[in-house]
């Protein structure tokens, strides 16, 4: 895709797409290698792995909204820079420790970093591009570039993890995230908003009040927040995918096979997003795409739950992580972004991130308890039921009717 195809803001679009790609390279390389590291090196149990996601979610819960307010009041760009610094610190530390408490601490840093990025990235793009009619398409293109970056990251860091060890690959991915933070600091502009120079606390509180009032009055935003909470409770099940596939029996080295699965999933997601990109502006398109994704996700989880081997289980993971999850995420952001104004954009997007976080906390504890009591299959099926519920909520939307 040519970033310059977005008229009126080619440099902004190109910068955003480049950043989306590079961030995904480091992020997915870390997710791939750390997921295997938790199982093969740290020897964490299923409940401990799910609790790691909950630790990250709790961190985001307490930091999402304050950081979103500061992003609107002070700077979206520098919120992104800070986010990269926290992410890099958490990633590097992960490769240096093996005990559960220390790994949990690294995930807290990871969560703080994502809280800085959540909302600020969408708000930065929307106001720097300043082309409302094209923003949804750039965001969808960004999701495609993110998937391309994921594939590249899995190739690069999967190979590095196989050749030099998982810990080494994790540390290098963190170093890459730190370098990307420097890219944001030097390349990103910030002309779309005028930051508060004085009384920043009062300004931040005022922005929070306006954003909260908008979210409470707008039924579509409330519906999006509710669906997001439910679906992200279910998405916590993805922390168990490496463990489940290893239990089903990879035919060779787990690092290489899991990397290959991730690459195929990214290609499938990119193809799905390409179909969506040209249709996302149509009446009711976002709602229909969201509901479709919420049907594919449970199908994939059921396939993984009853898979006779790693190959069949991998097909289930492809449906969930490769197609359903990317579609749900990008549609949620577009759904909310269309209904907010520039002055509270990052704040309201942080509400969406907060909804994700609340869902992850509740889902993480619930699924961890269920995994401990009833095993992996029942937990996978319960997660699928939650995704169906999220689709039912989205189906109630009146947008585009």
Image (cartoon, rainbow, N blue to C red):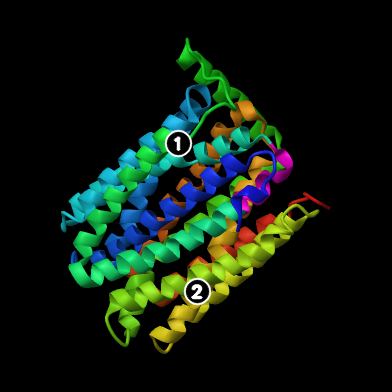
Label 1 belongs to which residue?
Answer: 187
x 47%, y 54%: residue: 21
Q: Is residue 108 visible?
A: no
Residue depicted at x 23% and y 50% = 92
Name the quarter where the N terminus is drawn.
bottom right
Q: Identify the element where label 2 is drawn.
A: helix
| Mark number, residue 279 | none
Q: Quadrant of residue 311?
A: bottom left
Q: Earlier in the sequence, mark 1 or mark 2?
A: 1
Q: Position of residue 243 (x, y in %)?
A: 32, 73
In this view, the residue in front, 245 or 195, is 195
The residue depicted at 55 percent of the width and 55 percent of the height is 143
Cα distance in 3D space between marks 1 and 2: 35 Å
The relative height of residue 115 versus residue 265 in the rendered view (above or below) is above
Check the image and report above or below for 118 versus 246.
above
Task: Specify whether 399 is left or right of 177.
Answer: right
Tally the numbered discs: 2
- The dominant secondary structure in magenta is helix
Q: Is residue 138 magenta?
A: yes
* Residue at image mark 2: 318
Q: In terms of depth relative to the viewer, which is nearer, 267 or 244?
A: 267
Between 184 and 315, the one nearer to me in the picture: 184
Would you say 162 lies left or right of 293 here? left
Q: Is residue 338 visible?
A: yes
Tell me the magenta residue range: 131-140
């Amino acid at each position: 895709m040519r970033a310059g195809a977005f008229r009126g803001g080619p440099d902004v679009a190109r910068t955003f797409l480049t950043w989306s790609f590079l961030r995904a390279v480091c992020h997915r390389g870390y997710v791939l290698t750390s997921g295997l590291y938790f199982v093969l090196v740290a020897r964490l149990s299923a409940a401990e792995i799910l609790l790691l996601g909950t630790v990250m979610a709790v961190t985001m819960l307490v930091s999402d909204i304050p950081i979103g307010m500061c992003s609107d009041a002070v700077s979206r760009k520098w919120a992104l820079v800070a986010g990269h610094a926290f992410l890099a610190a958490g990633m590097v530390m992960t490769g240096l420790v093996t005990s559960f408490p220390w790994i949990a601490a690294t995930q807290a840093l990871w969560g703080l970093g994502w809280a800085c990025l959540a909302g600020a990235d969408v708000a930065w793009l929307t106001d720097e591009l300043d082309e409302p009619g094209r923003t949804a398409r750039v965001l969808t293109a960004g999701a495609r570039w993110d998937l391309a970056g994921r594939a590249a990251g899995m190739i690069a860091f999967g190979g590095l993890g196989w050749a030099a060890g998982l810990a080494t690959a994790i540390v290098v991915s963190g170093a890459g995230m730190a370098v990307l933070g420097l890219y944001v600091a030097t390349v990103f502009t910030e002309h779309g908003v005028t930051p508060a120079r004085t009384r920043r606390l009062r300004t931040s509180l005022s922005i929070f009040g306006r954003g909260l009032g908008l979210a409470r009055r707008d039924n579509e935003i409330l519906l999006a927040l509710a669906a997001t909470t439910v679906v992200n409770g279910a998405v916590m099940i993805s922390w168990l995918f490496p463990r489940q596939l290893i239990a089903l029996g990879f035919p060779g080295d787990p690092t290489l096979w899991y990397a290959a699965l991730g690459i195929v999933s990214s290609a499938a997601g990119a193809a799905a997003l390409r179909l969506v990109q040209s249709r996302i502006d149509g009446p009711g398109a976002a709602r229909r795409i969201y509901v479709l994704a919420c049907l594919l996700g449970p199908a994939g989880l059921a396939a993984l739950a009853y898979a006779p081997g790693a190959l069949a289980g991998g097909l289930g993971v492809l449906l969930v992580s490769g197609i359903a999850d990317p579609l749900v995420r990008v549609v949620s952001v577009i759904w909310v972004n269309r209904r907010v104004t520039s002055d509270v954009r990052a704040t309201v997007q942080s509400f969406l991130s907060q909804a994700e976080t609340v869902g992850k906390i509740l889902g993480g504890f619930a699924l961890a308890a269920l995994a401990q009591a009833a095993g992996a299959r029942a937990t996978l099926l319960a997660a699928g039921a939650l995704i169906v519920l999220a689709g039912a909520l989205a189906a109630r939307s009146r947008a585009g009717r």
